[in-house]
Amino acid sequence: EVQLVESGGGLVQPGGSLRLSCAASGFTFSSYSMNWVRQAPGKGLEWVSYISSSSSTIYYADSVKGRFTISRDNAKNSLYLQMNSLRAEDTAVYYCARGTGYVDYWGQGTLVTVSS
Amino acid sequence: SYVLTQPPSVSVAPGKTARITCGGNNIGSKSVHWYQQKPGQAPVLVIYYDSDRPSGIPERFSGSNSGNTATLTISRVEAGDEADYYCQVWDSSSDLFGGGTKLTVL
């Protein structure tokens, strides 16, 4: 069974940093591209970042470019999102999501709250 | 930048057919994917590549895509279909989601 389990969310002050992790199991992690997708409270889905299976290709949404860094460790079956210079508008549930073009599996999400 | 436009809400009686649209410039030339999200839950893929259905998704869910509009069709709507639905495309090195449509079953 495919499982994606996010962790690392919490309350952080504006301008602060946070690192999200996603532990993957039930599939060959190194064979799949991965994404981070977020959802602000009461709002729609917003794609954040994409990383290919070998980390050779990485994309970011304009809203996070230069502030967020996606990475992965295939030996540890883990996906990461380093978030710096956080803003109030980054407050959201962050989902780890598997796939290229479309997402076939989603984690349950981790809540990031940016507030003073 | 590319924009996907969905109606904020659609209402349908049980047993009827619901159609949720996703508008975009020449969207028919792109692959469109659809997700269902119920309150407090992660999204679930219901249609990919315009009209393919993942295993476990009922045949009542179907999709089409042509011209400037992609459509998710839910036949014989059930109370359990009440949810938010999002369309999604991959465009110019980024994923795009529509604003979402809340499906209400009357």
Image: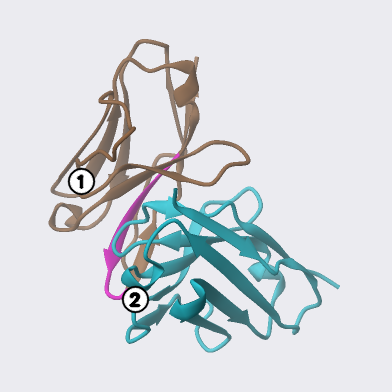
The verdict on residue B90 being magenta is: yes
Inter-mark Cα distance, 2 to 1:
24 Å
Q: Is most of the magenta stretch helix, strand or loop?
A: strand
10 Å crowding of disc 1: few (<14), some (14-19), many (20+): many
Chain letter for the part of the structure drawn in cyan:
A
Quarter residue A31 falls in: bottom left
Residue placed most toward the observer, B47 or B66? B47
Tell me residue A83's x, y (percent): 63, 80
Q: Taking the image as drawn, is residue A73 in sight?
A: no
Which range of residues does the magenta coloring cover? B85-93
Chain letter for the part of the structure drawn in brown:
B
Quadrant into which the C terminus of chain A falls:
bottom right
Q: Is residue A4 left or right of residue B70?
A: right
Cβ atoms under marks 2 and 1 closer than 8 Å: no
Q: Amino acid at mark 1?
A: Asp
Q: Subunit of mark 1?
A: B
User: Which numbered dot is residue A53?
Assistant: 2
Residue matched to label 1: B50
Q: Residue furthest right?
A: A116
Q: Is residue B81 left or right of residue B61?
A: right
User: Under tag 2, what secondary structure?
Assistant: loop
Q: Which residue is located at x 53 percent, y 79 percent?
A: A64
Residue placed most toward the observer, B91 or A52? A52
